[in-house]
Image (spheres, rainbow, N blue to C red):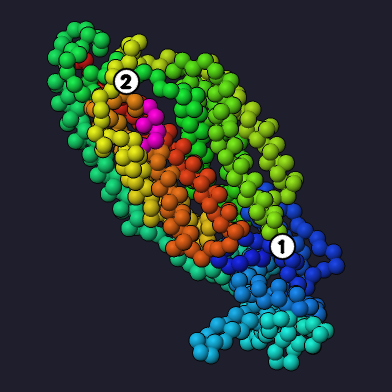
């Protein structure tokens, strides 16, 4: 039985999203390159798998078999030298098992005299473990192998170069088979125990305990302190035994006095409803992805599985955004519901398309495999046009037809009340700073591990912890929103609608600031290609968090306000 090896792209070790086709390097290649079909998620991940010249027969050892002989020009030697200096690594695939290795060897030592050595690995040892008729594990090693040294300018040292004729190299490989007691069903454990990349992810209980303590303190603040204050407010305000909200004493102050204005509908109704709709969609999508991961539906070593799931879920959950947006838009007496549906469908897709256009153009200019082929672009566009947008329209129509009344406990007067001058600590910027920092602090530690997974070489498998942190994030956002809304109303300021969205929605700004910190201090990423992708998609990530937390914040504030004004008059 012969086993084929596929080549995945190569790229700099410290720039995971900067990948190039393996055969762009001057290496052994077949006369005609055959590519293997990949899933949508793998293509989005930049994978381009091509067949290789390596021929491996099952349980058949091979010693120093010649792969090919090459004569490298000066330009090709410089290309290899540059790739080795940037720590280019390759990835092979043998029976769905990834195999990693570096293209060459670099050594830099000493100050005076300074030595800088660059060498090309021309021999690879394949070590393959098997059990019965199944391959369990495979890797490559260059132990006891001497690299071919490369000199700047296309020459070589050690007598390998041949003057103006270029550098002649012979690529060889060996294959060694080892029997393994591990059955095929458990070979993922062997792959998990070994990693070409450094392992730093572990269960981080300190992060969880820190977040839980924060949630307990916030819940204690909202439930105990705030409810005691509300109890005193109710005792003071409920002094009449008859009459509705409109008959209450207007000579008092505090949140009671603005009961005729607190449910006055805000400006930019359509935009507010679009934010709530898209935020609800991403809450559904994020929950679905985490639950699917908990159910074991994603193989951490299978490229692009989560990408594919996210695209499918985004298209299918478009009905959620249309329904929530149009339903609430109808409740607050919005008239242009068609425009509301269009705004909802483009609120995230338009920034996504703009960001992708810039990032993809940079990848295309650099020749990176991260640049999507035209067929994939048409497939994604078709998924949005034929599935995403129609479901948004359908959800909007259903939401409009099933929308009830707004159910405000108090009537709103025609003439708005004048808002008194507010102290500096009740301004929007201060509330955004407080409301954004607290939810961010609850996830700051976990955020590092997520960034290390998305922008690094880690495999994130702690989905149970991720679900807990996600729930903690939403809880903290809701609690701080209720507290800030109460303080706003206590100052007789009834403009809580947008303020509740912006208060904890500003968490996205903190996440983007953290991404800048991570790029500069926690990673070794560099270059235009990696920077464009990192900052472009970090901006989109910040937008997604702002939409999700702004939605949670708004509904928490609305529920709280309805509760206190409904309880204002007790018999």
Is residue 78 toward the left or the right of residue 14 in the image? Answer: right
Q: Is residue 223 left or right of residue 76?
A: left
| Vertical order, 197 against 325 (above or below) | below
Residue pictured at 17% horizontal, 15% vertical: 251
Given residues 557 and 165, the one toward you in this image is 165
Mostly what secondary structure, the magenta segment? helix
In the rendered view, tell whether residue 212 sits above or below residue 223.
Answer: below
Near mark 1 (Cα within 10 A), the count class, few <14, some 14-19 or many ≥20, is: many
Q: How many labels does the image show?
A: 2
Q: What stretch is highlighted in magenta?
A: 497-503
Circle 1 residue = 21
Image quadrant of residue 187?
bottom right
Camera-side mark, 1 or 2? 2
Residue in the image at 66% along x and 50% along y? 360
Task: Return the x and y of residue 518 as percentages of the image width and height.
Answer: 45, 58
- Which residue is under mark 2? 262
**SS for dot 1:** loop
Q: Few, some or many C-alpha atoms within 10 Å of disc 2 (few <14, some 14-19, many ≥20)?
A: many
Earlier sequence position, callout 1 versus callout 2 = 1
């Amino acid at each position: 039985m012969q086993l084929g090896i596929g080549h995945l792209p190569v790229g700099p070790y410290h720039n995971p999203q900067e990948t190039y086709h393996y055969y762009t390097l001057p290496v052994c290649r077949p006369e005609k390159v055959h590519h293997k079909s990949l899933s949508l998620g793998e293509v989005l991940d930049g994978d381009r798998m091509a067949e290789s010249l390596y021929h491996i027969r099952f349980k058949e050892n091979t010693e120093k078999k010649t792969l090919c002989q090459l004569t490298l020009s000066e330009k090709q030697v410089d290309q290899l030298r540059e790739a080795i200096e940037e720590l280019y690594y390759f990835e092979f695939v043998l029976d769905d098992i990834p195999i990693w290795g570096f293209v060459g060897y670099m050594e830099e030592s000493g100050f005076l005299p300074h030595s800088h050595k660059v060498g090309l690995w021309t021999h690879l040892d394949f070590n393959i473990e098997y059990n019965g008729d199944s391959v369990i594990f495979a890797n490559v090693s260059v132990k006891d192998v001497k690299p071919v040294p490369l000199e700047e300018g296309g020459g070589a040292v050690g007598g390998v170069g041949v003057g103006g004729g270029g550098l002649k190299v012979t690529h060889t490989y060996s294959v060694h088979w080892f029997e393994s007691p591990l059955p095929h069903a458990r070979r993922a454990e062997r792959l998990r125990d070994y990693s070409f990349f450094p392992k730093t992810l572990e269960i981080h209980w300190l992060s969880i305990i820190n977040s839980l303590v924060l949630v307990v303190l916030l819940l204690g603040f909202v439930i105990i302190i705030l409810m005691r204050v509300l109890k005193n407010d109710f005792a003071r305000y409920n002094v009449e035994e008859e009459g509705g909200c409109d008959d209450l004493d207007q000579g008092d102050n505090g949140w009671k006095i603005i009961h005729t204005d607190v449910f006055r509908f805000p400006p930019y109704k359509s935009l507010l409803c679009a934010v709530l709709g898209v935020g609800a969609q991403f809450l559904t999508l994020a929950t679905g992805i985490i639950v699917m991961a908990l159910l074991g539906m994603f193989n951490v070593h299978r490229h692009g599985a989560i990408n594919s799931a996210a695209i499918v879920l985004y298209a299918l959950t478009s009905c959620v955004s249309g329904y929530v947006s149009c339903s609430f838009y109808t409740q607050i007496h919005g008239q242009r519901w068609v425009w509301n549906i269009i705004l909802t469908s483009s609120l995230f897709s338009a920034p996504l398309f703009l960001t992708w256009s810039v990032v993809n153009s940079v990848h295309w200019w650099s020749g990176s495999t991260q640049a999507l082929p035209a067929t994939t672009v048409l497939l994604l566009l078709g998924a949005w046009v034929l599935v995403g947008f129609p479901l948004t329209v359908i959800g909007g129509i259903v939401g409009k037809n099933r929308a009830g009344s707004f159910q405000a406990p108090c009537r709103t007067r025609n003439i708005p009340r004048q808002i008194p001058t507010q102290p500096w600590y009740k301004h929007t910027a201060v509330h955004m700073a407080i409301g954004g920092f607290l939810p961010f602090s609850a996830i700051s530690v976990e955020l590092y591990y997520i960034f290390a997974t998305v922008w690094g070489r880690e495999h994130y498998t702690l989905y149970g912890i991720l679900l807990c942190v996600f729930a903690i994030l939403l809880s903290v956002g809701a609690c701080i929103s209720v507290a800030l809304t109460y303080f706003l109303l206590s100052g007789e300021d009834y403009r809580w609608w947008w303020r509740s969205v912006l208060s904890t929605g500003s968490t996205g700004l903190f996440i983007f600031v953290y991404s800048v910190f991570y790029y500069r201090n926690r990673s070794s990423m560099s270059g235009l290609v990696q920077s464009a992708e990192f900052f472009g998609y970090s901006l989109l990530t910040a937008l997604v968090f702002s939409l999700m937390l702004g939605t949670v914040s708004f509904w928490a504030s609305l529920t709280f306000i309805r509760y206190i004004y409904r309880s204002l008059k007790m018999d």
